[in-house]
Amino acid sequence: MPHITIELSQGVNIDETELLSKLNHALFATGQFKESRDIKGRIHRSDASLIGLGAEDGGHFVIAHLAIMQGRTDEIKSDLVSVVMKVLQQVVSPKLTGVQYAVNLTELSHFYQKALV
C-alpha cells in the first residue's frame, strides 16, 4: 500500500516512467510506507476528454488518485496529497502549460486484502 493511479487527458505527453518513479520515490521518502514494493503506481490515458465546454475552458488535466490504508491523521493525509501534487507539477509543468491538476486521497476498506504469491 498505497496505490497511486494517474489519469492523463489527451495531449499530455510526458515520460510516464519518470513520473511514476518520482512519485514512488517521493511517497516512500515520507516514511509512511514500510517497503518500497508496497507502492503501486499506474497511469491511464484518456482516449477522449473534455474540460468544461471546450478548449477555452482548458486543454489538459492530470488527476492523481491515492488510495491508502486507514488510520493516518488528517495532517499526514494532507502531507501525502501535497507530496503527490508537487511531483505532478514538477514533472508536467515544464513540458506543458494550462494544465489542471487534482489529487484525491481515499482510504481503503478494512476488508482490503493483498497477497504476494
Image (cartoon, rainbow, N blue to C red):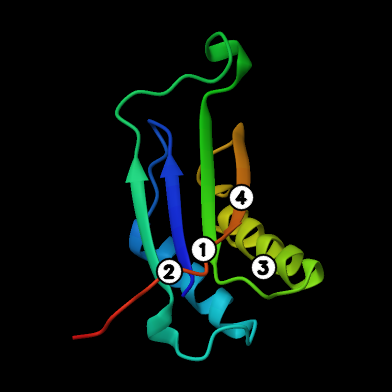
Kind of residue indicated by mark 1: Ser
Disc 2 or 3, which lies upstream in sequence? 3
Disc 2 or 4, which lies upstream in sequence? 4
Kind of residue indicated by mark 3: Leu
Which quarter of the picture shows residue 111?
Answer: bottom left
Q: CA distance from mark 2 to mark 4?
A: 19 Å
Q: Which residue is mark 4?
A: 104
Give the residue furthest to the top: 53
Q: Nearer the viewer, mark 1 or mark 3?
A: 1
- The image's mark for residue 109 is 1
* Labels 2 and 4 touching (C-beta < 8 A): no
* Labels 2 and 1 touching (C-beta < 8 A): yes
Q: Which residue is mark 3?
A: 80
Q: Is residue 97 above or below residue 49?
A: below
- The image's mark for residue 112 is 2
Instruction: Looking at the picture, tell me which residue is in the foreground, 99 or 42.
Output: 42
Instruction: Looking at the picture, tell me which residue is in the foreground, 81 or 89.
Output: 81
Q: Residue at x 59, y 56 (%)?
A: 106
Q: Secondary structure at mark 2?
A: loop
Q: Is residue 29 above or below residue 58?
A: below
Q: Secondary structure at mark 4?
A: strand
